[in-house]
Image (tube, rainbow, N blue to C red):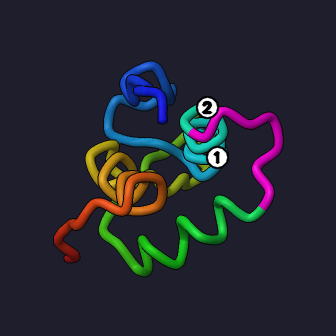
Amino acid sequence: MKKVDIEEFGIYRQGLTGAEIQEYLKKRAGVKEIGNLYKQFGKIAGANTGMVVLDEFENRIYLMYRHDVERFAGVLFENKETYFD
């Protein structure tokens, strides 16, 4: 599994959107199509903490913290143990 710098992803400093998480997972997996990776990731992450920010049109956007994305991806791709909130 190749190392991917999570800081290369996302337009918000605080975390990643769902679409950005999908791009991160694809790059980390080395695939062009997401397939069921995002669904598997969601099962691992469950209901997790994050934050809501407003975009330039005042729409609410949920962000998952980068640290959480990285550690849940570690469970998915490397079978790493992690703590759960």
Locate residue 50, reporting x and y percent: 34, 60
Q: Secondary structure at mark 1?
A: helix
Residue behind mark 2: 27
* Part of the protein shown in magenta: 29-35
Locate residue 33, reporting x and y percent: 82, 43
In the displayed structure, 46 sits above or below 65; it is below
Q: Secondary structure at mark 2?
A: helix
User: Gap between marks 2 and 1, in whole Å?
Assistant: 9 Å
In the displayed structure, 40 sits above or below 21; it is below
Quick check: can you spot residue 76?
Answer: yes
Whichever of callouts 2 and 1 sits on the residue coming sooner in the sequence is 1
Quick check: can you spot residue 51?
Answer: no
Nearest to viewer (mark 2 / mark 1): 2
Name the quadrant containing residue 81: bottom left
Main SS, magenta region, reads loop
Q: What residue is drawn where x is 66% and y is 33%?
A: 30
Q: What residue is drawn where x is 36% and y is 62%?
A: 79
Q: Few, some or many C-alpha atoms within 10 Å of disc 1 (few <14, some 14-19, many ≥20)?
A: some
Residue behind mark 1: 22
Q: What residue is drawn where x is 33% and y is 43%?
A: 66
Instruction: Decide if residue 7 is on the left or right side of residue 43.
Output: left
**Identity of the amino acid at label 2?**
Lys
Does the segment drawn in magenta span residue 47?
no
Locate residue 20, reporting x and y percent: 59, 39
Instruction: Decide if residue 25 is on the left or right side of residue 79.
Output: right
Q: What residue is drawn where x is 53% and y is 65%?
A: 41
**Identity of the amino acid at label 1?**
Gln
Instruction: Decide if residue 55 is on the left or right side of residue 45.
Output: right
